[in-house]
């Protein structure tokens, strides 16, 4: 169990914490539970969770602000688990960097399945993908969620941004459709997924120093998808 992925659960409802922790530990994960954002943030100085389940209705911190900070500073998978069921809440959460959004009430088995999908590793015996790639003078380190510019400047990647960049670098100079993004990255089809992808790609372009009017690396094919134009080294 020591090598099992660690899932951090942040929710002020004891029964929700108990339900999620029991389901995840039964599925082979390790868990740590927190009732307040301050406890959770303090724990991040000593633990490195593989995924975080974040409630938005926290007593001591705005949940969306916390999601945004985590997406900027952490390589963990971020899944919002919230009673806020409005489409705009879902869209905002995904735009701020969450990888997924689950509304309450939920089935614990669904939460387990979504975490497994996000943390899925290549099957044993298959070739492992290199975790450091170079393209157009840039270096992407997918182990450290770090992007290094040609001048040596380092910029952190969120898990969501790294997922999209990995999809591009796995498929250079090939059209990647929205349907392929949905199948590979997971999520629910619809406007919220499309908008979240647009935001992630926009952030990637910014971190890659792209001119939005004349991008050199990520080209939009309107009505079709995207093409990553760089050669991979």
Image: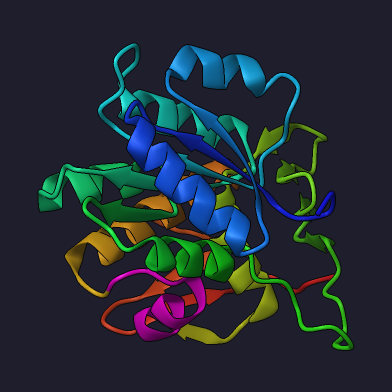
Q: Vertically, is 45 above or below 180?
A: above
Camera-nearest residue between 193 and 77:
77
Q: Residue at 44% of width from left, 82% of height from top?
A: 183
Q: Which residues are magenta?
A: 177-188
Whether residue 120 sits left or right of residue 122 in the image: it is: left
Q: In the rendered view, would you say 230 is above or below 65?
A: below
Label the magenta part by its dominant secondary structure. Answer: helix
**Image position of 74 (left or right of 12):** right
In the picture, measured across the screen, residue 150 lies left or right of residue 201, that is right
Quarter the C terminus occupies? bottom right
Q: Position of residue 167 (x, y in %)?
A: 59, 72
What residue sits 41% from the left and 48% below the top?
Answer: 19
Quarter of the rendering occupied by the N terminus: bottom right
Q: Answer whether residue 136 is visible to the viewer in this image.
A: yes
Q: Nearer the viewer, residue 91 or 219?
A: 91
Above-or-below relation of 68 to 114: above
Q: x, y percentage for residue 169?
A: 68, 71
Residue 39 lies, with reference to residue 19, above or below; the image says above
Determine the residue positioned at 71% across, 19% down: 45
Colour pattern of the rendering: rainbow
Q: Does residue 186 show up magenta in the picture?
A: yes
Can residue 184 be found in the magenta stretch? Answer: yes
Res. 211 in view: no
Residue 4 point in image, percent of width and height: 76, 55
At 79% from the left and 51% from the top, the residue drawn is 143
Asked where in the image residue 134 lies, by quadrant, the reply is bottom right
State the image coordinates of residue 93 (x, y, percent, origin top left). Answer: 30, 43
């Amino acid at each position: 169990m020591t090598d099992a992925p660690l899932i951090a659960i942040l929710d002020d409802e004891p029964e929700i914490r108990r339900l999620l922790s029991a389901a995840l530990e039964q599925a082979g994960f390790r868990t740590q539970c927190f009732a307040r954002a301050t406890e959770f943030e303090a724990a991040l100085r000593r633990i490195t969770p593989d995924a975080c389940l974040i409630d938005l209705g926290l007593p001591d911190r705005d949940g969306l602000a916390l999601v945004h900070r985590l997406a900027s500073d952490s390589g963990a998978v971020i899944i919002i688990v919230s009673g806020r069921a409005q489409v705009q809440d879902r869209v905002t959460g995904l735009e701020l960097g969450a990888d997924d959004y689950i509304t309450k009430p939920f089935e614990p088995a669904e939460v387990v399945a979504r975490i497994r999908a996000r943390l899925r590793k290549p099957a044993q015996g298959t070739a492992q993908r290199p975790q450091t790639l170079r393209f157009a003078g840039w270096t992407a380190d997918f182990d450290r969620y770090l992007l290094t510019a040609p001048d040596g400047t380092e910029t952190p990647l969120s898990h969501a941004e790294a997922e999209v960049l990995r999809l591009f670098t796995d498929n250079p100079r090939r059209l990647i459709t929205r349907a392929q993004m949905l199948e590979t990255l997971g999520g629910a089809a619809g406007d919220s997924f499309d908008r979240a992808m647009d935001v992630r790609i926009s952030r990637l372009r910014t971190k890659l120093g792209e001119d939005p009017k004349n991008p050199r690396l990520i080209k939009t094919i309107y009505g079709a998808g995207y093409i990553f134009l760089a050669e991979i080294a």
